[in-house]
Amino acid sequence: MAQATEATIPNASQLILNFINCKTTTMQLCCKIIVVKWYYLYTLNKYMSKRVLAYLGFFLVLLGGFYFFLFRGTDKWKKKLSVISYVKPFQFTTQEGLPFNDRDLLGKVTVVEYFFTSCKGICPKMNKNMKEIYDLFQSEPDFMILSHTCDPETDSVPKLKRYSDSMQVNSRKWVMVTGRKDSLYQMARAAYLLDDPKNSVQKIEDQFIHTQFFALVDKDGKVRSQIYDGLKKEEIEKLKKDIRELLQERSSNSNFVNGIFNNNP
């Protein structure tokens, strides 16, 4: 029995015993019993620690499973499209002669562009592709298109209305706006990133934006993902995919913060 007990003593304990200068066999046996008990208590404590870790690990697995089933299929679970800019406050006028401001974008996924009605170059090609997007998403209640004129001196409200009618679109789903040139251009550069801000150093009357790019705004007034080339088929397809993704996202705020959407009526 004594030999079996000694076999369970770890090397460190055995070394301790070797240094004990016992005068009698009884004293030596007592010392060995004390060391063996210490070893088993040490082992028991280690076992208890492992049990605690096992319980903790089991709890973490359960917690992870809970979050997986809770958020699976929601926008909280998957990676979101990046935010590249933010809508700034604005006030323009639509092709129907109605006021239109930044708050009207709240809750909508919006594709943004700049064009002018007398354009014979890239604008017809851009708006042919934009019409394709319109036809695909026009039945979505949370979708719209916002087209700004680059030439407000020429593109009056009646001209925008005629252009809109020629496209055979719903003016509440495809909004075309005019306004002050400096305000229109400021939005293109500072909010939608559709033109180089360095171009603003010229006198406003000498400036002219002629861009083929589209921007995509989410329901909270954030410009998302990238700037899309409105003339490239592959980027139009990417835009369609990103629109679908943003339509599935929930709006995180009833009013956009940081002064972009405010609480003013």
Image (spheres, grey):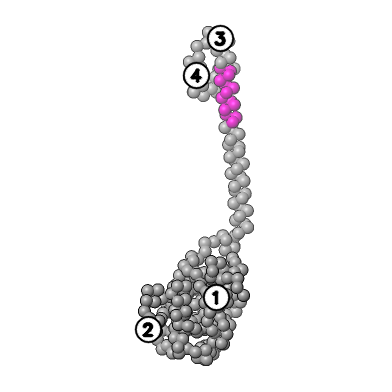
Indicate which label's residue lies in the foreground, 2 or 4. 2
Residue type at mark 1: give it: Asp
Magenta stretch holds residue 218: no
Residue 255, located in which quarter of the rendered image?
bottom right
User: Which tag, 2 or 4, sits closer to the chain's start?
Assistant: 4
Indicate which label's residue lies in the foreground, 3 or 4. 4
Question: Is residue 69 visible in the rendered structure shown here?
Answer: yes
Identify the image quadrant of the N terminus: top right
Tell me the residue that label 3 is attached to.
Answer: 25
Tell me the residue that label 2 is attached to.
Answer: 206
Q: Position of residue 202 (x, y in %)?
A: 36, 79
User: Which tag, 2 or 1, sits closer to the chain's start?
Assistant: 1
Tell me the residue that label 4 is attached to.
Answer: 16
Q: Magenta residues, as a range? A: 32-45
For the stretch drawn in magenta, the main secondary structure is helix
Magenta stretch holds residue 40: yes
Query: Is disc 4 surrounded by few (<14), some (14 to 19) or many (20+) residues within 10 Å?
Result: few
Residue type at mark 2: give it: Asp
Asked whether, in this view, residue 244 is left or right of residue 125, the answer is right
Which numbered circle lies on residue 102? 1
In space, the residues marked 2 and 1 are separated at their CA atoms by 27 Å
